Amino acid sequence: MTKEPVSLAHALASFSEQWSPRIVTAVNDYDVRIAKVEGEHLWHVHDDTDEFFLVLDGELHIGLREPAGERTVVLPKGSVFTVPRGTEHKPYAPVPTAILVIEPTGTLTVGDRHDEIPDHVEATTGHALR
């Protein structure tokens, strides 16, 4: 963790990979990650943690499989949403999108249980920002 401010614009400009988050800082035992995303992620579940999303640019859709049925939330730029622990979900970005995600350090981007991982999605706990 750096002791200097981090420009999210500069951090986002430092990489081009999609669905491959960078850790910009930490808060207690949580990573603050940014990612560039477009297209579909995969259905997955985080059994023991919520997942916080903030859309920095673009638009993010999150499919949710809940006890009452399946639904999709749409997050335009500037919106936040928390996926509750144990909820199967699938992020999708119809346009190039930049997001900020807060999760416990060490949380895999594909959750604890998931569909087959497509080639364009990286299963990672996040990469250090360079």
Image (cartoon, rainbow, N blue to C red):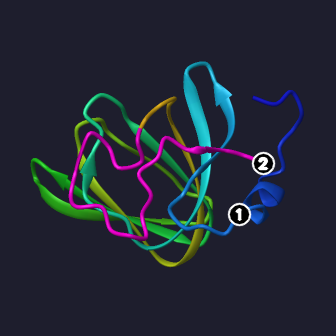
Instruction: Identify residue for label 2.
Output: 130
- Quadrant of the frame with the N terminus: top right
Kindly check if marks 2 and 1 are in contact, taking CB atoms under 8 A apart as contact: yes
Q: What's under tag 1, amino acid-wise?
A: Phe
Name the image quarter holding residue 111: top left
Residue 128 shown in magenta: yes
Q: Which mark is residue 15?
A: 1
Where 49 falls versus 72 (above or below)? above
Residue extent of the magenta highlight = 108-129
Name the image quarter holding residue 78: bottom right
Q: What's under tag 2, amino acid-wise?
A: Arg
Q: Viewed as shown, does residue 110 lie left or right of 27?
A: left
Nearer-the-camera pick, 106 or 67:
106
Where does residue 79 sit, x and y in percent of width and height?
Answer: 55, 57
Where 94 falls versus 65 (above or below)? below
Q: Viewed as shown, does residue 114 lie left or right of 21?
A: left
| View extreme (right): residue | 4
Nearer-the-camera pick, 110 or 62:
110
